[in-house]
Image (cartoon, rainbow, N blue to C red):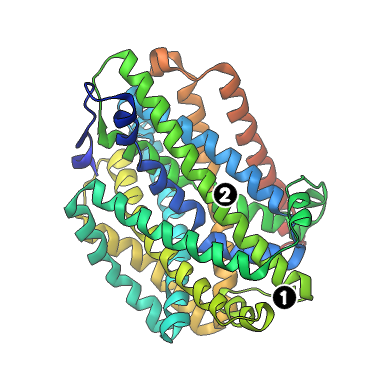
Amino acid sequence: MRNTFGTIHVDPSQGRLRRALSFVGPGYLVAVGYMDPGNWATSITGGAQFGFTLLSVVMLSNIMAIILQALAARLAIATGQDLAQASAAGVSRPTAVVLWFLAEIAIIATDIAEVVGTAIGLNLLFGVPLVPGIIITALDVFLVLWLQKQGMRWVEAFVVSLLGVIFVSFAIQMALVRPEWVAVLRGFVPDVEVVHNPQMLYLALGIIGATVMPHNLYLHSGVVLTRKTVDTEAHRREALTFATLDSTAALMFALVINASILILAAATFHATGRVDVGDLGHAHDMLAPLVGSLLAPKLFAVALLACGLNSTVTATMAGQIVMEGFIKIRMAAWLRRLVTRLAAIIPSVWITAVYGPPGTGMLLILSQVVLAFQLPFAIVPLVKMTASRDRMGSLVAPRGLTAVAWLIAGLIIALNVKLLADLALGKAG
C-alpha cells in the first residue's frame, strides 16, 4: 500500500469543485465495509426477530462511524501517517506486535464474513455448493492484484460500480415489499429494551461490530494518503474538509443500505411471524413466496455477491496497511491476500461442513461480535492521538469532538462488558 501514497495529485490551480472531486473515492472504499455480508446476517436476524426496533442501533452505529472515520482522516492528513504507523510510533515494539495481532484477528473475522457471504451468493445465483464456493473465493486474489496494478482510481471505480448495483437491487426490493413507513420511522427512535434484553443486545453489538469496523479505521487513514496536496496549513485544512465530506456522504449511503436490509427482514419475515430466519440462504428462499415475486430473491443474491466482492478488495488493502504500519513487514499482495483468505477459509469450510447453512449464519454473526470486541484497541489510540496537539499540531481535534469520540469508545467498551457477562451467564448467543 505504501507505494500508492501520494499517487493522486490534487492540483491547487484547479477550481474548488475539481479539487473536492479529487477527494471523492476513499469514503466509498470505507463504506463497503459497512455493508458487508456480516451486516446482512446481523441486520436480517435483527429485523426478523425484533422488527424495526434495531433500526435505532443501525442509525447510532452509523453516527459513530461518521465521527470515527472523520478522526481517521484527520490523523492521516495532520501527521502524514496512517493509524497503524502512528500507533506503532508511540509504543514499544512488543506492544506494536500485540496491536498488529489484534488487528489481524479483526481482518480475519471480516474475511470470514466475506468468504461465507460470497459463497452464499454463488450458491444462490449459480447453484454452487457452499463448501466448493468457499474454496473458490481463494481465486479473488487475482481480482485484487489486477485492480491494484491498474491504480487507485480503478479500485475506486470498481467499488463504486458495485455499490450502484447494490443500491438498485435494494431500491427495487423496497418497492416490491412496500413496508409500513410509519413503523419504520418509529424504529429509528431508541428503545431501552435493547439494553435489557440479552438476545437483542447480542444482535445490537453484532450490528455495531458490523458497522463500526476496526479495519476500516486503518483503511481510511491509509487511502486518504493517496491524495497528494500542497503541504501548507490552508491546503491541509481544505483536504480535511473534502475528505470528511467524502466519508460522511459515503457512510450516509451505507446507512440507507443497512437500514434497507433490516427493513426488508422486518417487513417480510417478522411481519409474518417468521422470526427464526438465521441464515442468508434461508432468507433468500423465503423472499419469493412472501413478497410474491421471483425477482426479489434474485436481486437479494446479486446484491449479496456484489457486497462480498467489494469487501474482498478493501479488506486486502487494510491488511497491507496494518502489516506494514505496525511491524514494518512488506509482503507481496498476492501472498498477503492468500494467507488471510486461507485463515478465513479453513474455519468457514469446517463450520459449513459440520453444521450446514445454519452454521454459516451463526459464523457471520459471531464474526461481527469479534469485531466489536477488537474495536477499543483501534478507537482508543485514534481518539488519544487526534486529541494531542503535539501529534496533530493545528489540526488537533476540537475538544467537543474528542469528548464525543471518548463517549463512543466508552459506550462500546461498556456494551462489550455487558455482553461478556450475559455470555458467561448463558443469557445470550
Q: Nearer the viewer, residue 205 or 94?
A: 205
Q: Which of 102 and 162 is in front in this view?
A: 162
Q: Position of residue 154 (x, y in %)?
A: 24, 52
| SS at mark 1 in the image | loop
* Residue 233 - label: none
Residue at figure coordinates x 40%, y 73% from the top left: 346
- Closest to the camera, between mark 1 and mark 2, is 2
Decide if residue 429 is in sight here: no
Q: Mark 2 points at which residue?
A: 255
Decide if residue 246 is in sight here: yes
Amino acid tagged 1: Asp
Reading the chain from its start, which is encountered first: label 1 or label 2? 2
Residue at figure coordinates x 43%, y 70% from the top left: 305
Name which quarter of the figure residue 171 lies in.
bottom right
Near mark 2 (Cα within 10 A), the count class, few <14, some 14-19 or many ≥20, is: many
Q: Position of residue 378 (x, y in %)?
A: 48, 39
Q: Position of residue 62 (x, y in %)?
A: 58, 44
Q: Quarter of the image for the C terminus: give it.
A: bottom right
Q: Nearer the viewer, residue 66 or 397?
A: 66
| SS at mark 2 in the image | helix
Query: How far apart are the alpha carbons under marks 1 and 2?
Result: 25 Å
Residue at figure coordinates x 21%, y 21% from the top left: 13
Looking at the image, do the residues carrying marks 1 and 2 touch, with CB atoms under 8 Å apart? no
Q: Name the residue under label 1.
A: 276
